[in-house]
């Protein structure tokens, strides 16, 4: 035990730090993005992929109860371990089912309760697994223990890494499987074994069953390994690897044939959308700047560490002779790093929307580039300049820098303002609640947590106020949601609806409570 602690204390420290920070930000998460609600619904709703399916496919002029909302997002009755329902829901969605299967399992163990902790505990386990696998990958590539731990802490405490964890979505599993694929290929480079090619096959299938964007980095990484093996004349390894990689990708169609429909559909998240974005050359500069901004904001500690390495190398290299290198530079790191930069550019160009989550799985490989610089610096300076004690101090300094970054900039998807919103609604829980939407389920899905405040919600369009008046009766005060998103849903003009309410009803006053992504919430009173 003492020997394990002696050899693994740095990784243990990283896992404790990352786990503690993940727990801290998990407690601060007060709301969810619409896709996070979809995670719960698609995983746990029995053969009803979307909220409108709970009411027979339409919400218009219908009352949705709290129990129906909870039934959509939680495991009830015999829905536990209902993998067939998850598969059905994902056929009708735009993503493959692996993460949703895991989420259904987690929800079943959660006892049917709807809670943010169901997703956060699952994500936390997967995230710490990614941190540990990144450490193992760096060691497999020949990095010293302290270099591996530095990479792990730079990723584990990065803003963008923590955002991957607190977003209850498949991207955290995608990041883990990306690092697992990197590890198996590094293992092949170190010591070829046919069974490792089988693991590559299974990892490729698992990654594609998690999120289709896995294919891009996987393709370039596999291509880089093939080139490396050709240079090294490892033809036997290629004879095993290439068929296994191709079968791994093709297996997706056998396991989840709906992937072809998703690829060629005209939806926002589809192959057609990606091709349209690829053809739009004018957007390239803007998109690249946007995604570079995501990376630089989310990896500040890693960038500072890289700059220090470059500065050190520039300062000492002119004074060194070639003979002063303790060993040749290990360029195998580049097999994993260069494909990440190529994929980064491609994903930035074709992603359906400009959001950082589409590069979440590339972040470990980008941080690995900092590990390469640390390895080059360590090799250049050599044991005569860097003692083990100095390396420990360098790792601890990097850990402090990463911890300071985590303290200075919180991750995305916390929604702290929602605590105030929920408090406002709790004071009005006894009021009737009316949702104006032209039969779109997206805004109601995003607001689902807030709508759980009420016993029921009446959904209506903006054509006729009579149904609303029949529903609210003689209530003095009504909570009104208006679907205002032009891009995603109805795009109603809130001022126009409120003006008609003042003119045609006894509700003459309207107070805006708050605005979220797809809707604005008001209280109207007589």
Image (spheres, helix red, strand yellow):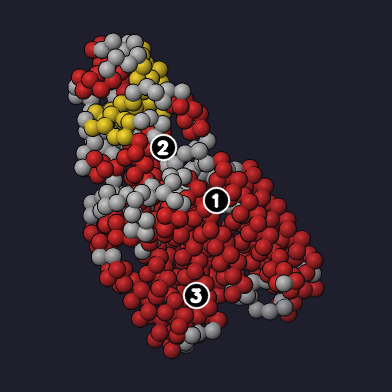
List x then y, in percent, for residue 407: 64, 44
User: Along the polypeptide, which appears first: circle 2 or circle 3?
Assistant: 3
| SS at mark 3 in the image | helix
**In terms of image quadrants, where is residue 151?**
bottom right
- Cα–Cα gap, marks 1 and 2: 23 Å
Does residue 59 sit above or below 322 in this rendering?
A: above
| Left or right relative to 390: residue 72 | left
- Check residue 162 in the rendering and tell me which mark sits there, or answer none: 1
Query: Residue at left 30%, top 18%?
Result: 498
User: Along the polypeptide, which appears first: circle 1 or circle 2?
Assistant: 1
List x then y, in percent, for residue 506: 28, 10
Query: Residue at left 53%, top 75%?
Result: 186
- Cα–Cα gap, marks 2 and 3: 41 Å
| Left or right relative to 31: residue 51 | left
Asked if residue 307 shows in the view, the reply is no
Query: Residue at left 72%, top 68%?
Result: 5
Q: Residue 321 versus residue 275: which sits nearer the camera?
A: 275
Query: Residue at left 31%, top 34%?
Result: 65
Locate the C terminus by quadrant.
top left
Locate the N terminus by quadrant.
bottom right
**In terms of image quadrants, where is residue 227?**
bottom left
Q: Pick out the residue farthest to the front.
A: 77
Q: Residue 14 versus residue 470: which sits nearer the camera?
A: 470
């Amino acid at each position: 035990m003492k020997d394990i602690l002696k050899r693994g204390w740095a990784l243990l420290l990283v896992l404790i730090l990352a786990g503690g920070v993940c727990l801290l930000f998990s407690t601060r998460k007060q709301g969810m993005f619409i896709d996070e609600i979809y995670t719960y619904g698609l995983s746990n709703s029995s053969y009803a992929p979307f909220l409108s399916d709970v009411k027979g496919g339409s919400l218009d002029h219908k009352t949705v109860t709290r129990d129906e909302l909870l039934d959509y997002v939680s495991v009830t009755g015999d829905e536990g371990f209902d993998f067939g329902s998850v598969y059905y829901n994902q056929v009708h969605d735009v993503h493959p089912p692996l993460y949703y299967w895991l989420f259904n399992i987690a929800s079943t163990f959660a006892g049917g309760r709807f809670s943010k902790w169901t997703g956060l505990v699952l994500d936390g386990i997967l995230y710490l697994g990614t941190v540990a696998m990144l450490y193992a990958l760096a060691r497999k590539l020949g990095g010293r223990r302290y270099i591996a731990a530095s990479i792990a802490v730079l990723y584990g405490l990065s803003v963008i890494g923590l955002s991957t964890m607190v977003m209850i979505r498949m991207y955290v599993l995608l990041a883990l499987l990306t690092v697992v694929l990197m590890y198996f290929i590094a293992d092949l480079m170190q010591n070829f074994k046919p069974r490792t090619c089988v693991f590559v096959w299974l990892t490729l299938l698992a990654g594609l069953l998690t999120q289709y964007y896995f294919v891009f980095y996987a393709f370039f990484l596999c291509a880089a390994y093939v080139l490396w093996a050709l240079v090294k004349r490892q033809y036997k390894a290629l004879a095993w690897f290439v068929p296994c990689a191709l079968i791994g990708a093709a297996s997706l169609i056998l396991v989840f044939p709906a992937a072809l429909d998703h690829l060629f559909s005209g939806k926002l998240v589809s192959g057609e959308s990606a091709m349209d974005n690829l053809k739009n050359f004018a957007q390239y500069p803007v998109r690249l700047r946007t995604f570079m901004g995501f990376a630089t904001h989310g990896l500040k500690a890693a960038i500072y560490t890289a700059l220090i390495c470059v500065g050190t190398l520039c300062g000492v290299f002119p004074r060194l002779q070639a003979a002063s290198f303790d060993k040749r530079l290990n360029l195998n790191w580049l097999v994993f790093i260069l494909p990440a930069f190529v994929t980064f550019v491609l994903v930035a160009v074709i992603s359906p929307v400009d959001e950082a989550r589409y590069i979440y799985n590339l972040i470990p490989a980008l941080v690995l580039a900092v590990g390469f610089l640390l390895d080059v610096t360590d090799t250049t300076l050599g044991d005569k300049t860097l003692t083990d004690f100095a390396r420990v101090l360098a790792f601890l300094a990097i850990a402090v820098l990463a911890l300071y970054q985590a303290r200075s900039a919180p991750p995305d998807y916390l929604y702290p303002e929602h605590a105030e919103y929920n408090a406002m609604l709790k004071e009005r829980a006894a009021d009737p609640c009316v949702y104006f939407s032209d039969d779109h389920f997206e805004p109601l899905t995003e607001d689902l947590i807030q709508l759980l405040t009420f016993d029921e919600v009446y959904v209506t369009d903006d054509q006729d106020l009579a149904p609303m008046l029949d529903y609210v009766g003689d209530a003095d005060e009504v909570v009104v949601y208006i679907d205002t998103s032009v891009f995603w849903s109805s795009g109603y003009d809130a001022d126009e609806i409120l003006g008609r309410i003042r003119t045609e009803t006894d509700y003459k006053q309207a107070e805006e409570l708050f605005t979220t992504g797809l809707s604005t919430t008001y209280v109207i009173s007589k």
